[in-house]
Image: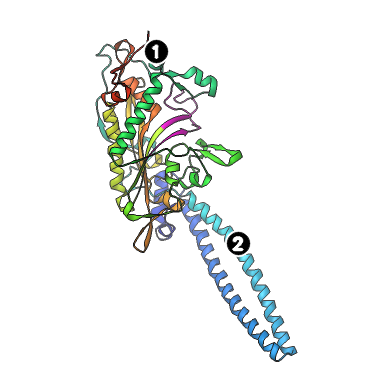
Amino acid sequence: MINPDFVRNNPQIVKDSQSARGENPALVDEFLKNDQLWRNLTVEVDNLRAEQKSLSKEIGNLKGQQKSSPGAEFDKQLDALTKRGTELSDNIASLATKQEEIKKLADKAMFGISNLVHKDAPIGEEKDFKVIETIGKPRDFNAEGIKIKDHVELGEELKLIDLERGAKVSGSRFYYLVGDGALLELALVNFAIGIAQNHGFTPVIPPALVKPAAMEGTGFLGQTAENVYRIEQDDMYLVGTSEVPLAAMHMDEILNNKELPIKYAGYSPCYRREAGSHGKDTRGIFRVHWFDKVEMFIFSNIEDADKIHKELLEIEKEILTKLELPFRVIDVATGDLGSSAARKFDCEAWIPSSNEYRELTSTSNCTEFQARRLKIRTRAGDKTNYVATLNGTLLAVTRTIVALLENHQQKGGSVRIPESIRPYLKNREYLKILN
């Protein structure tokens, strides 16, 4: 949620931000209309309550006088005041009910307004991203005399991935990682956690089931709600990213400003319904309903958010470089940011079998948007402020395995293991076909 005072004082800026996202700017007018009605009703109710308080004192004084000098005139006055008191109580109750209804309408409009887009984010739809840099060069497999195999063929030949049994047990977009496939995940996770620790992150294994407040507070029950798995019987949600439990970890708390930035690296399973992706990436493990991920998450002062966002990007670039993957960095266009992010950078690795760059990691600056919803503040002296929240994918396991297998495949069907993760795989140089 953005600052309501900012919306009240800068409605056109917020409308322009909504339009840049391709979202509804009329929500701003809807909020302002109902917010003003609510505030008018608040003044009216406060005035009536002040009158009620004054009337109560007057009735008390009159009753005191009546005890010392009873008479019909006192009775008549007391009846009139009591009648007025009843009218005031009825009016206050009626207006309070109306006030609550109007507040719900204002809140609904406000919760529909996405974060303000960053001034430097490229305006446009998904295709209007800006390429910031390209790192590494895709291999010329033709020059090496290698016919490119995709990760499914490599995974089956090397006995790393079992898609058939995954589908048998759980349905489409599920899989088993077997043997060296399972060891490869563990190697990658330990490698990523080590890098995170080198940069001052505290490792966390968070819950993968959360209450509605956590999901709503991080903005995942808005535009992306259709991709969320809900356990109806318990009113719980399976997280699509550990960003959710990491953000909610400090909800309703006031953090010590001296401890900021607080940096976590969460390792968790992630669950996504992938609604709307029918027929897209159906082959293999690039787009699946469940995968494991290492996610960076930071609570910081708002004035440090832009700098920290770039630092998160550098860490993502570091891990992809150490995995010896060719990739590019893009500045995501406003229409593809998601409701919480003000700005987002993606790192897209080269996938040889599809001859294109595909997203492997992403980092978002959510400014105060999530913190306001989750009520996470910091105290500096006598003043409290909302913190900024930032997140970044350090390792999405399945997509990273796809990129590794395809980019490091060799003649004869083996796959070269990047030097950076060999210590986690008994210093082996290759994944080879077993006889």
Whether pointer 2 and pointer 1 mark residues with C-beta atoms closer than 8 Å, the reply is: no
Q: Which residues are magenta?
A: 265-292
Q: Nearer the viewer, residue 432 or 124?
A: 432
Residue at (42, 31) in percent of width and height:
292
Q: Is residue 157 above or below residue 135?
A: above
In the picture, which quadrant includes the C terminus? Answer: top left
Predominant secondary structure in magenta?
loop
Give the label on residue 157, or none.
1
**What is the crowding at mark 2: few (fewer than 14 residues within 10 Å), some, or many (at least 20)?**
some
Colour scheme employed for the rendering of this structure: rainbow
**What is the crowding at mark 1: few (fewer than 14 residues within 10 Å), some, or many (at least 20)?**
some
* x and y, in percent, of residue 198 in the image: 28, 38
Decide if residue 260 is in sight here. yes
Q: Nearer the viewer, residue 403 or 352?
A: 403
* x and y, in percent, of residue 257 in the image: 34, 55
Q: Which residue is label 2 attached to?
A: 98
Comparing marks 2 and 1, which lies closer to the viewer? Answer: 1
Position of residue 46 in the picture relative to residue 16 (left or right)? right
Could you tell me which secondary element the residue under label 1 belongs to?
helix
Find the distance from the CA under tag 2 to the CA under tag 1.
67 Å
